[in-house]
Amino acid sequence: MYPANWAACTPDKPAVVIAETGESRTYEALDGASASLAQHFRKVGLGVGDNVAILMDNRPELLETAWAAQRSGLYYTPLNWHLTPGEMAYILDDCQARVLVVGADHADVAAGLLGERPHLHGVVVGADVPGSARYEDVLADMPSDPLPDETEGQDMIYTSGTTGKPKGGMRPLPPFHPADETDKLTRLFGWAGMGADTVYLSPGAPLYHAAPLRFSIMQGRLGGTTVVMQRFDPLAALASIERYAVTHSQWVPTMFVRLLRLSEEERTGFDLSSHTLAMHAAAPCPVEVKRQMMAWWGRIIHEYYGASEGGALSHIGPEDWLAHPGSVGRAVYGRFRILDDNGNELPPDEPGTVYYEKGLPIRYHNDEEKTRTAHGPNGWSTVGDLGYLDGDGYLYLVGRRANLIISGGVNIYPQEIEDVLTTHPAVADVAVIGVPNADFGQEVRAVVEPVDHGNAGPELADELIAYCRAQLAAFKCPRTVDFERELPRAPNGKLYKRLLMDRYWKGADAAG
């Protein structure tokens, strides 16, 4: 199924709504715009397997563009508009984009990118860029009939680059028409019960991230309504649930933390009775944070674990989570395997590298070496996460291999420490990293974003270390605490630890 099916039977139903403004697109409008844009892509020479890049804020035209590529056999790559022009240029060149579709807010950046790439055709929403087509003119000039050779396209989303240069996760183009009911994502997330009656809230995570984009596309297949917030704000999110009678939503743990900071009066000021399922992913959620959210919203919170490029997928519902707190669930299909550094399978409760047997294939565009290292000799796949299985086969994550701290030969998992410090009322956000130590190789340091930066200083640092020592073994606790006004966290909840670590390790290797 795809928007054309729903345009035929529910033409006036909202497919996409911008929460803050109420701007919307009906299924008839989404179908017509995406068909016209697909016609334009063919007119300027794009064929099946070519790439379209998208540089746009959360707005309806982004989903129109995605659907145009999705229904014409193209790959489409949404660009993170927080990146520098140089970083965007790297992705444009790496994905071999032939068209760049741009929102007016980014027209100046796009003008430079397009000017340096004569082969790259520009389409700009609501602004004029020399040499580029205007989006509104394209829709007016092109027929809104479906292409005669409509075939399924695919997103090519680049990793966030938290541990290195971003890489594009590339999957084979599905060999079927977009009207066929064979979408894998819809089947894998059947537990969510989404359908034509669903009103799905995407509460401010940029649509250039995998989950917000893919779930919005899935809604277009199922005939539901997607409500997109342009920016996350905890009060506005609750207001959107009430205003639009939201049934399903998707969050990241940092959003939960900000919601829990609201006063009791603010929390109880909205009617959330329509809200029957909230899911979260993207980053580990501290156990206490999730307990508090479940006490507030009830047993409607589900969690899944996966990677944008493929590999593993797990799910855990609220009842199972209460029996296995901290777990990200069991495999939706296939099987998790935990291996040590020598490739030996580990017993329950012993952490190692998480591999996935019979998972979604992982392939990185233009990087055969990274593709190779994402698979073991037996073909099992990994994205470098560390974790363990309990005796019932439930997976618990303990961090990323790239972020593991080895101090005096002992493995220390930052996530465990972060989960403790996150619950301190003076902490807005925290990153725990390993920094150079002449005697032990590394030592544990916490980098904290305080709720009130005026309180940052030695007294709060000592308080946080003592708070940690009351709950964890002393060797795991930070020896020092640094304070930052804002940690480098992506809007999808992922922390750019590499940027923090570079400050402490720059020159350390050479000195050693």
Image (tube, rainbow, N blue to C red):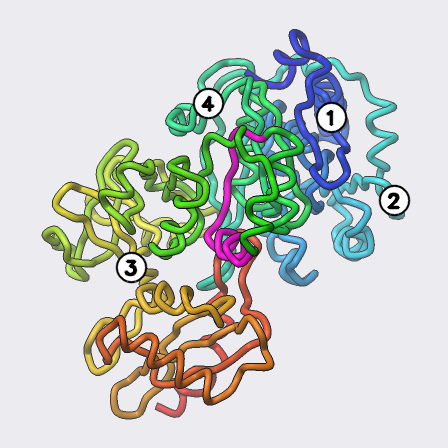
Q: Which residue is mark 3?
A: 398
- Sequence order check, earlier mark of 3 and 1: 1
Residue 89, can we see it? Answer: no
Magenta residues span 246-262
Type of amino acid at the residue the image marks with label 2: Ala
Q: Which residue is label 1 attached to?
A: 25
User: Which residue shows up at 21% across the image and 48% down it?
Assistant: 377
Q: Which of the numbered marks, if any, corresponds to residue 268? A: none
Location of the N terminus (image quadrant): top right
Q: Amino acid at mark 3?
A: Val
Mark 2 closeness class: few <14, some 14–19, many ≥20 residues within 10 Å: some
Q: Is residue 93 above or below residue 311?
A: below
Residue 133 at x, y = what percent? 85, 37
Dot 2 or dot 1: first in sequence order is: 1
Which of the two marks, 3 or 4, is nearer to us in this view? Answer: 3
**Residue 240 left/right relative to 29:** left
Left or right of 212 in this view: 363: left
Quarter of the rendering containing residue 6: top right
Front residue of 349 and 365: 349
User: From what the image shows, is residue 33 above or below residue 345?
Assistant: above
At 73% across and 16% down in the image, what residue appears? Answer: 28
Asked whether residue 184 is in view, the answer is yes
Residue sitting at x 64%, y 41%: 239
Residue labelled with disc 2: 127
Q: Which mark is residue 183?
A: 4
